Image (cartoon, rainbow, N blue to C red):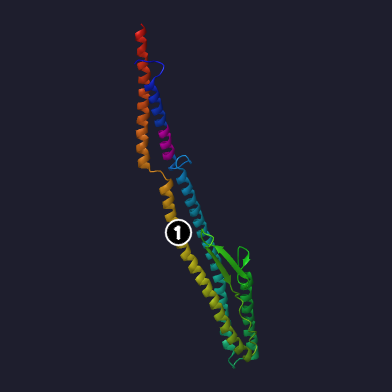
Amino acid sequence: MTAINTNVGALMARTNARSADSATETQMRRLSSGKRINSAADDAAGLAGGNKILSQVRGIEMGIRNSNDAVALLETADAGYSTTASILQRMREIAVQMSNDVYTSADRINANLEFSALELAATSISTDTKFNESVLLTGGFKGTMRIGNDDAEVMTIVLDDSDVYAGGSISTQVKAQTAVTALATAINTLSGAQADVGSYINRLQFNVNNLSQAAVVAEKTLGTITDADYAKETSNLAKNQILSQAATSMLAQANSNKQNVLTLLQ
């Protein structure tokens, strides 16, 4: 039957042209952004999953940053402990020297001057060692560090007082002998504090390595879900461009065919 009110061929061609044009726009959007999912309409479930993984990646990255900040804090404390340990070792040398009975009162006064100055320097390190305005080595520092993405990934850092010597002067031989014993105890105490700092740093460094690997895996998973496959999208783009051109050509042909009806009226 020859009809002019309903041009089925033109309607079908127009529908196919619209479909091809829409698909072409989708491919161009994916190729220009590098993303397979640019809106919820592209893949609602994939978008939701991608957002969860992206949140995980951001949390992991911040956990790495927090861990590195904690390492910097601990290295600051360790520097203070190390300097104090050197001071205590020198103080013990002087105390051992003054434990000998061959020195005069004047010698002991001079030695005690250096000894007292070193003791003041150790105390100053305790009160002046800070990280971002937090005093670290007076025995009052206790910090909770968020070192991962999950709420349970926290670490508590406790730093002991570095001012551990309280043995008095070395103005006499007896006092010097007492100081030797007190300094040995102080050095051992400080060594324990340094060991704690070392264990904290090692744990944090292992944590950074673990989080870095987890971030790589999460990024890879995120890319699998949301990134565009360029080989596939360029192939689909070429196909849809051809289909769009073909549909446009067929639409013109369908409209042209209806013009032939006019010849029947002549």
In this orientation, does residue 129 appear? no
Give the magenta range. Answer: 22-31
Membership of 53 in magenta stretch: no
Between residues 248 and 68, which one lies in front from this camera angle? 248
Q: In the rendered view, tell whether residue 213 sits above or below residue 11.
A: below
Q: Position of residue 54 (x, y in %)?
A: 48, 51
**Residue at numbered disc 1:** 212
**Magenta region, mostly helix, strand or loop?**
helix
Q: In the rendered view, tell whether residue 237 sits above or below residue 4.
A: below
Q: Please tell me how many numbered marks the rendered image carries.
A: 1
Q: At 54% from the left edge and 71% from the top edge, which residue is drawn?
A: 78
Does dot 1 land on a helix, a strand or a loop? helix
- The quadrant of the picture occupied by the N terminus is top left
In this orientation, does residue 51 appear? yes
Q: Amino acid at mark 1?
A: Ser
* Disc 1 crowd, CA 10 A, few/some/many (<14, 14-19, 20+): some
Quadrant of residue 13 within the rendered picture: top left
Quadrant of residue 134 within the rendered picture: bottom right
Q: At 47% from the left edge and 45% from the top edge, which residue is drawn?
A: 47
Between residues 12 and 24, which one lies in front from this camera angle? 12
